[in-house]
């Protein structure tokens, strides 16, 4: 067994929390590998798994027992144990899927990678886990930066503790490189838990503004007229477009706006070029403190192939290059060869694509953009493939409708 499993179980009795399908599958897989003492749940009358004993969860002793949570309600049970009973994640209990990854890593002598970041890092981890060669040698565990770093808008103390205790046993820790002082401080808080055997891998990340000169804000922000529909997140209408906002404010018609933005001389040449130069400069800065660098690839390929879906989400082409460079950094040549033959397009298929203004495409010489180029638009009625004209017409109409709605809202 991996030292992590040995250290947390010690000589304690193993209790499975959850007697449904997940608990049964876990028992079938592991009952002959180590002794499982009993099972429990929140049910008044517990139906046992096979011949296991049953125990009421209130009778579980954290000094004598170790819990493996085999339930789809993991977060609720984790909260129950930590806030009501004082149990600690990865000390007194563990999620079944994490246990399986760590256990298998120990049995097959895999190296453990813990990765923390937002969607870009998550997508890299998904791609790595699609490679059978890589999975034979590595266990990859991903944590959402927004949940385990204190600056995150979904910060979760329980998940942070899980991450901190797993990092201690990791062989590699992957994180983004381009960080503000506040975010850097929060990552350093996590890094204090790194074991002496762990190697830090920083990945160069930055927002891509070159393709979208219509948003000149310092940071990515939400469309002024964005209103969710029935509680659903409508990707096609969230991103800010200051050009369209200005025209909507002036009550321009759809036709008038489209006539303007479809012109190949709509954007000033110097505006687009300066925007691109600033983007490339940010890429260079991010590379300075990164192990996985990307400036050279972006500078050489931004006009030849599509690299981003929007300012912060990778197109498949760029995702593939990031994963390739991680593999080369780790010396995984066999996995890099498998990646070149693997279809990873499904990873980015849920991401809304921002259309590129004809004037921007002309000024930057984007070889892959023309009048018939299709963009993936995530709307209230599903995902559509549409042209620039179709996309922008629906976007303008949406903003016009939202403007009317917001007139009668207290936050407008």
Image (cartoon, rainbow, N blue to C red):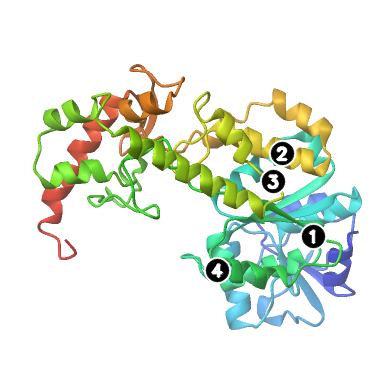
The image quarter containing residue 212 is top left
CB of mark 2 within 8 Å of CB of mark 3? yes
The image quarter containing residue 354 is top left
Q: Alpha carbon of mark 1 to alpha carbon of mark 3: how far?
A: 19 Å
Q: Which residue is mark 4?
A: 181
Q: Which residue is mark 2?
A: 325
Q: Alpha carbon of mark 2 to alpha carbon of mark 3: how far?
A: 6 Å
Q: Nearer the viewer, mark 2 or mark 4?
A: 4
Q: Left or right: 247 with respect to 288?
A: left
| 157 versus 118 height, above or below | below
Q: Residues within 10 Å of mark 2 (few under 14, many from 20)?
A: some
Name the residue located 62 percent from the left edge and 34 percent from the top edge: 297
Mark positioned earlier in the residue sequence (4 or 1):
1
Q: Which residue is mark 3?
A: 292
Name the residue located 29 percent from the left edge and 34 percent from the top edge: 268
Q: Residues within 10 Å of mark 4 (few under 14, many from 20)?
A: few
């Amino acid at each position: 067994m991996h030292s992590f499993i040995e250290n947390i179980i010690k000589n304690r009795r193993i209790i499975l929390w959850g007697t449904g399908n997940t608990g049964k599958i876990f028992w079938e897989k592991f009952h002959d590998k180590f002794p499982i003492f009993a099972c429990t749940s929140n049910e008044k009358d517990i139906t046992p798994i096979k011949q296991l004993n049953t125990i009421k969860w209130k009778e579980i002793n954290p000094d004598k027992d170790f819990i493996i949570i085999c339930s789809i309600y993991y977060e609720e049970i984790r909260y129950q144990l930590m806030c009501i009973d004082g149990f600690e994640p990865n000390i007194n209990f563990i999620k079944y899927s994490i246990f399986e990854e760590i256990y298998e890593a120990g049995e097959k002598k895999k190296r453990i990678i813990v990765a923390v970041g937002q969607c870009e890092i998550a997508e890299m981890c998904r791609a790595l886990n699609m490679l059978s060669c890589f999975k034979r040698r590595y266990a990859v565990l991903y944590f959402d930066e927004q949940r385990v770093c204190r600056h995150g808008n979904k910060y979760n103390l329980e998940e942070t503790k899980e991450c901190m205790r797993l990092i201690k046993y990791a062989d590699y820790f992957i994180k983004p490189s381009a960080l503000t002082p506040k975010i850097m401080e929060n990552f350093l808080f996590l890094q204090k838990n790194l074991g002496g055997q762990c190697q830090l891998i920083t990945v160069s990340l930055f927002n891509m503004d070159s393709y979208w000169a219509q948003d000149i804000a310092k940071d990515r922000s939400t469309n002024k007229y964005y209103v969710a529909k029935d509680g659903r997140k409508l990707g096609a209408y969230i991103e800010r477009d200051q050009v369209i906002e200005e025209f909507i404010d002036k009550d321009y018609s759809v036709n008038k706006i489209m006539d303007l933005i479809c012109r190949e001389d709509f954007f000033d040449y110097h505006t687009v070029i300066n925007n691109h130069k600033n983007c490339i400069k940010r890429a260079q800065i991010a590379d300075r403190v990164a192990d996985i660098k990307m400036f050279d690839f972006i500078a050489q390929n931004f006009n030849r192939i599509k690299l981003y879906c929007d300012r912060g989400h990778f197109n498949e082409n760029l995702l593939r290059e990031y994963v390739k460079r991680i593999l080369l950094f780790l010396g995984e040549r066999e996995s890099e060869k498998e990646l070149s033959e693997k279809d990873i397009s499904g990873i980015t298929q849920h991401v809304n694509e921002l259309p590129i203004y004809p004037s921007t495409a002309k000024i930057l010489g984007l070889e892959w953009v023309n009048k018939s180029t299709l963009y993936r638009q995530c709307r209230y009625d599903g995902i559509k493939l549409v042209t620039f004209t179709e996309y922008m017409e629906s976007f303008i109409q949406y903003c016009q409708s939202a403007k009317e709605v917001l007139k009668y809202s207290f936050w407008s």
